Image: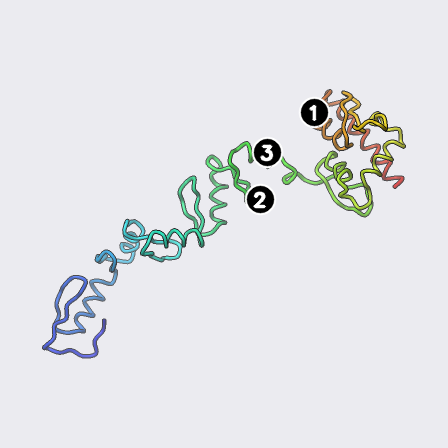
Amino acid sequence: MYYDSDSSDECYDCRKCGASFSCGWDLNNHDSNQHAYYCDRCGRSFVNQAALQQHLENSSFHYYCVFCKRDFAEREWYGTHMLEYHERCHTCQIDFRHVDWLHRHYADTPDRHSFCLECKRHFSSPDNLKHHLASGLHQERTIECVAPRCQRRFISLPALLGHYDSGGCSEISRDHMDCFTRSVGGRGYIVADDDTHFYRCPLCDKRFLLFSGVAAHVEGGKCANEEERARVGESIWDILALFQQYH
């Protein structure tokens, strides 16, 4: 409070410490010098801003946001503010100003968090993160669709064949692939036309409804040895190469 004039008949008391002054200007000077760093809620003065700041952050009577420099009167107001504007690591019980800071914290503490920094996803266990990183989302797509105008790429041969089986290619359908595979003799993959499971594995004779099922079965190491599986993969590529020539 500031005063434009004084009066010798009046007494001016400091509401913060009780000191009395005969002059309003003296009270103003006292307040500026002695109570520049004052906590109204607790009725305490501090020697500098750093001491006041430490009090606001550590006192159980304050709900203080260190990011916004705001002191909330109620815990609920503080909690709502933190939920709406900031992020919390519930594992470490640490608050962060922005979600990017939280994500960096996850990435920097892999012993406590299973986090994919690229996808910004947090997983419940290291095994789940491992499976995610091994998925197609994180594998290079090097296999091109044989259809000349499709231009889509895939991470594996089963994924490419699944592209045709699912109707994902506008130029090559599952029916096209089935008919062509039958027309070139099947290379050991075709079973009887009236069999519900149209394809079979040439290594173990297991039956599949889709050609992509055979490829996934073989590539997944479900039967035979690596050399034999490689030969099966090559023969499937031969069929695709022939298909590309005649398409």
Place of residue 112 in the rendered image (x, y in percent of width and height, measured from the top left) = 46, 36
Tell me, for residue 131, which label it has, or none: 3
Of pointers 1 and 3, the one earlier in the residue sequence: 3
Which of the 4 image quadrants contains residue 195? top right
Secondary structure type for disc 3: helix
> Disc 1 and disc 3: Cα gap in Å?
17 Å
Q: Where is residue 89 in the image (x, y as percent from the top left)?
A: 44, 43
Q: How crowded is mark 3: few (under 14 residues within 10 Å), some or many (20 or more)?
A: few
As rendered, which of 168 and 137 lies closer to the eye?
168
Decide: is 1 above or below 135: below
Position of residue 183 in the picture relative to residue 13 (left or right):
right
Amino acid type indicated by mark 1: Gly
* Residue for point 19% across, 62% down: 16
Q: Name the residue under label 2.
A: 119
Q: Residues within 10 Å of mark 2 (few under 14, many from 20)?
A: few
Q: Circle 1 sits on which residue?
A: 221
Compare marks 2 and 1 and give the one earlier in the sequence: 2
Q: Determine the CA span between mark 2 and mark 3.
A: 14 Å
**Label 2 element class:** loop
Residue found 84% across the figure and 32% down from its top: 238
Q: In this view, does 73 lie above or below 143?
A: below
Total labels: the figure holds 3
How is the rendered protein coloured? rainbow
Q: Looking at this view, is 173 or 237 the one in front?
A: 173
Rendered position, 75 above or below 155: below
Residue depicted at x 47% and y 34%: 111
Give coordinates of residue 247: x percent, y percent.
87, 41
Name the mark on residue 16: none
66 with respect to 223 (left or right) = left
Question: In the rendered structure, which amino acid carries the disc numbered 2?
Answer: Cys
Looking at the rendered structure, the kind of residue marked 3 is His
